[in-house]
Image (cartoon, helix red, strand yellow):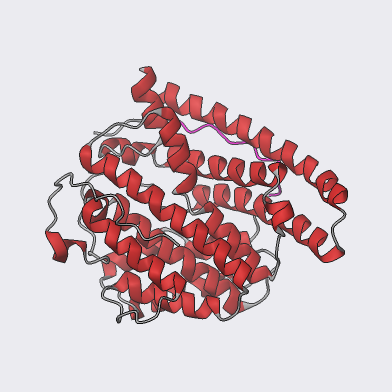
């Protein structure tokens, strides 16, 4: 049984995303890459990936005319989407005890730890390939920032999996925190900087206006996602969804919860716009050199395309469309993390011991 809701239109003061001239070639090449590393092994998995319309990652880089750069962005986001499926809809999200060491192995790849063994599962092999293609063409400051953001993402994913495995409801504050951190927003923004060859200096990046831009963008993206995924996720008891948490904690009807999230998105759009207006004054007051000032300007532009592009992607993709049996494929995906082999597919509710996660 599904719950019928109406998703209100989200008003964003940015131009609608346009097709990219190189867009049509992105998905076939990404599918070939995913097959090569075993992320996709069956036609059903290929069809699942097609429905995600990952070629629309080009919305995040409308001015980039480099095919390899756009392909790298698309492959990275494909890896992130497959990662999310493993957490949300396969066994990995129900086994935090087994997920934690896998996330540590992913971190080790991004740190270039010496003596790393050969990748033991498809997700590791694909990540190693992505990092090799990326790290060689990036500076140490960018690599550190990217590592920190992805590591934070992993921590948030582990926290969410503990809630899921133990069936512990989230309160509103926890859900808001985790939604921002599990949405791959800082990760995608870092990749925007990488493929555009832009560096936003720490004096700007760590400022209140830029951090407000970044995290209001994260909230807008992830709360929008919660509206589009509400029907599917409510059907199989997902906890990490703001509309579901509001509905449970405040005793709201489904449409009331959806409308409440929509109003919160409007507030965050206003925060984003206000911070965008404040950023130029901050840049002038810092008396930055011209290249740093341009980096700040480009960073704002990239965040705008990220917010608008994500919304347009939600309107265009088929990821959240469903048939009459919305839970039919739940926890039936291929195990790409080696979780099932390590410990079976039962939900034991095991929680990892403190200290499992490696620190940088």
What is the x, y in percent for residue 24? 54, 71
Q: Residue furthest top?
A: 251
Q: Which quadrant is home to the N terminus?
A: top left
347 sits to left or right of 137: left
Q: Quadrant of residue 121?
A: bottom left
Q: Is residue 159 left or right of residue 262?
A: left
Residue 292 seen in the figure: yes
Residue in the picture at 20% in, 57% down: 332
111 to 318, vertically: above or below: below
255 or 137: nearer the viewer: 137
Find residue 70 and report its horizontal and vertical position in percent. Answer: 58, 72
Residue extent of the magenta highlight:
6-15
Instruction: Say whether residue 10 is magenta.
Output: yes
Q: Where 210 falls versus 39 (above or below)? A: above
**Is residue 39 at least partly visible in the picture?**
no
Q: How far from the left and from the top, in percent, is residue 47? A: 34, 64
Q: Residue at x 33, y 56 (%)?
A: 85
Main secondary structure found in the magenta portion: loop
Q: Is residue 237 magenta?
A: no
Residue 145: x percent and y percent?
Answer: 57, 61
In the image, 216 versus 355, the foreground residue is 355
Disc tally is 0
Depth check, front residue: 191 or 36: 191
User: What residue appears at the point 36 percent right and 55 percent down from the top-left corner?
Assistant: 84
**Near-viewer residue (142 or 360):** 360
């Amino acid at each position: 049984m599904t719950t019928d809701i109406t998703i209100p239109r989200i008003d964003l003061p940015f131009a609608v995303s346009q097709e990219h001239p190189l867009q049509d070639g992105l998905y076939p090449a990404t599918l070939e890459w995913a097959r090569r590393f075993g992320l996709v092994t069956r036609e059903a998995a290929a069809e699942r990936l097609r429905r995600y319309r990952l070629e629309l990652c080009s919305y995040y880089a409308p001015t980039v005319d480099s095919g390899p750069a756009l392909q790298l962005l698309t492959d990275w986001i494909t890896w992130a989407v497959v990662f999310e499926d493993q957490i949300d809809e396969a066994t990995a999200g129900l086994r935090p005890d087994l997920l934690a060491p896998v996330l540590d192995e992913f971190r080790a790849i991004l740190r270039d730890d010496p003596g790393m063994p050969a990748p033991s599962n498809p997700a590791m092999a694909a990540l190693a390939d992505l990092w090799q293609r990326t790290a060689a063409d990036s500076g140490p400051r960018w690599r550190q920032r990217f590592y920190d953001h992805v590591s934070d993402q992993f921590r948030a994913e582990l926290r969410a999996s503990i809630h899921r495995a133990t069936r512990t409801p989230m309160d509103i504050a926890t859900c808001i925190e985790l939604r921002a951190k599990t949405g791959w927003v800082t990760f995608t923004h870092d990749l925007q900087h990488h493929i555009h060859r832009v560096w936003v200096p720490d004096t700007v990046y760590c400022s209140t206006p830029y951090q407000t831009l970044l995290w209001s963008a994260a909230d807008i993206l992830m709360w929008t996602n919660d509206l589009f995924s509400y029907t599917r996720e409510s059907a199989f008891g997902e906890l990490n969804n703001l509309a579901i948490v509001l509905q449970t904690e405040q005793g709201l009807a489904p449409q009331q919860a959806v409308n409440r999230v929509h109003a919160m998105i409007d507030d965050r759009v206003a925060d984003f716009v206000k911070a965008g207006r404040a950023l130029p004054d901050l840049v002038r007051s810092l008396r930055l050199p011209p290249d740093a000032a341009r980096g700040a300007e480009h960073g704002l532009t990239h965040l705008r395309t990220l917010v608008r592009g994500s919304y347009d992607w939600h309107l265009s993709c088929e990821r959240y469309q469903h048939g009459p049996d919305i839970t039919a494929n739940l926890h039936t995906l291929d195990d790409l993390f080696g979780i099932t082999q390590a410990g079976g597919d039962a939900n034991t509710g095991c929680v990892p011991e403190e200290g499992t996660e490696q620190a940088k």
